[in-house]
Amino acid sequence: MATGKTVMCSLSQLRPLTCASTSASRLVPQPPDLIKWVTREGGFVHRAVKITQLDSSNGLGLVAKEEIPRGSDLIVLPHHLPLRFTSLQQDPSLLHHLARQVPEELWAMKLGLKLLQERAKVGSFWWPYISNLPETYTVPIFFSGEDIKNLHYAPILHQVNKRCRFLLDFEREVKRTLVSLTQDKHPFGGQEVDASSLGWAMSAVSSRAFRLYGEKDPNGIRIDIPMMLPLIDMCNHSFNPNARIVQEQDTSNSRMQVKVVAETAIKEDDPLLLCYGCLNNDLFLLDYGFVMHSNPYDCIELKYDGALLDAASTAAGVSSPNFSAPVPWQELILSQLNLAGETADLKVSLGGQETVEARLLAALRVLLSSNVETVQKYDLSTLQSLDAEAPLGVANEIAVFRTLIALCVIALGHFPTKIMDDESLLKQGASGSTELAIQYRIQKKSVIIDVMRNISRRLKLLSSKETATAEG
Ligand SMILES: C[S@@+](CC[C@H](N)C(=O)[O-])C[C@H]1O[C@@H](n2cnc3c(N)ncnc32)[C@H](O)[C@@H]1O
């Protein structure tokens, strides 16, 4: 959890232009009209849809100029408008050679290479779209080192560092591959590509691409691939969207077209909103450069660690916890939960939809129980369910809840500032990426506090039941 002494890597010193900015400035000052371009290319745009600068810091967005009935087609893109990058296996081109060096988890960089190529190409078919893309992104790879540290949360620091390192290494690889190429063979028209332009392209894709069905593979199965969807990607995100993306066959040519359809009736002046996915704030920040307040999918990550759990249990007043030295039957259950053994996955989480990760809950219940017979009466799924009421007895459940609350207190203690401190920093007027970093860490601490509230409520209920039983 703590920031620790990680050596931070950032791209901010490479090109000041790319540091976090909330402005909506585009690649060129007056780009072509995107709606006209989509329509001219055979697409459809509902007459009530317009692009507008939003009041908030969300950049541009789409809004309804008049009421739109539910079920209406809002935008239809014919098959040739989305920007995709396919056929990685067979293509011997240099671009594909470079794309093959990108790790799968950084898929956005692969399509980013195609985007950079089209950006550099004079007369690119996609120029009307590309020129409308934001010039800068608010993702943390462009934060200053100080603001990366300001995130105060080790797992995201690790991810930012990984992405920055990758971009710096990849810059070297791209330069090595392209050195001494003549302009006609150069995939970027002879233009210099550095970590900053690679970062721009990766962020443009991660913040705008949607994974949709692509071409069919040799077995006739459609594989999903990321695509950039001109105009559709002007829709901002909401967990309560009023629009959704649909893919269907174009009856005129039997190719797949991509549509946005009104999911609800849309009132005049309402923004058109899509749901980007049930993502936590780490993904929103890393890929999209924003943070959702009260995000129901946000969570914090902890390491399942016997010593930490012993400390939490002891702090909670639970007598003689033995997380550090489980007995063999407990160890066996830990292995079944994949929390012990050579291939164990020790990352566990608090918050999100589960409140307490199922594996952590089961481990606490089992390790705080000394009665193998009682434990063996239950299957793993019951032991992992927060809705299963005290399967190993009320006393065991109370010890589990107290340990969890103490764990939350320890996790909160790893943050160097309190929410109150953060809020007063925001009031003093922090700028761009500093504000984003502070908002991010406020949300992380809020997740922990919400978990504490939830568990405390359950604890209170259980304790009152225990008292009632004792009195009865
Ligand atoms: C697919 S684009 C949407 C169009 C974008 N606003 C623009 O100006 O081009 C995604 C980007 O919009 C912004 N955005 C979308 N939804 C947002 C939200 N709910 N809160 C803050 N920013 C949002 C973020 O900058 C994100 O990276």
Image (cartoon, helix red, strand yellow):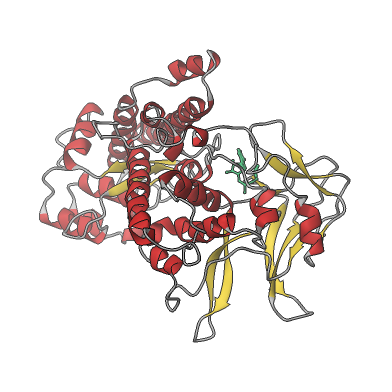
Taking the spot 39% from the left edge, 60% from the top edge, the residue there is 178
Q: Quadrant of residue 299?
A: top left
Quadrant assignment for the N terminus: top left
Taking the spot 49% from the left edge, 33% from the top edge, the residue there is 19
Taking the spot 74% from the left edge, 47% from the top edge, the residue there is 272
Closest to the observer, 104 or 419: 104
469 lies above or below 222: above
Residue 139 locus on image (x, y percent): 49, 40
State whether residue 35 appears in this view: yes
State whether residue 74 appears in this view: no
259 lies above or below 419: below
Residue 452 locus on image (x, y percent): 40, 32
Residue 338 locus on image (x, y percent): 25, 58
Quadrant assignment for the C terminus: top left
Q: In which quarter of the image is ligand 1?
A: top right
Closest to the observer, 391 or 382: 382
**Number of marks in the rendered image:** 0
342 left or right of 175 in image: left
440 lies above or below 254: above
Residue 412 locus on image (x, y percent): 35, 27
179 left or right of 241 in image: left
398 lies above or below 228: above
Q: Quadrant of residue 461?
A: top left
354 left or right of 236 in image: left
Closest to the observer, 427 or 52: 52
Q: Which residue lies furthest to the bottom in this view?
A: 219
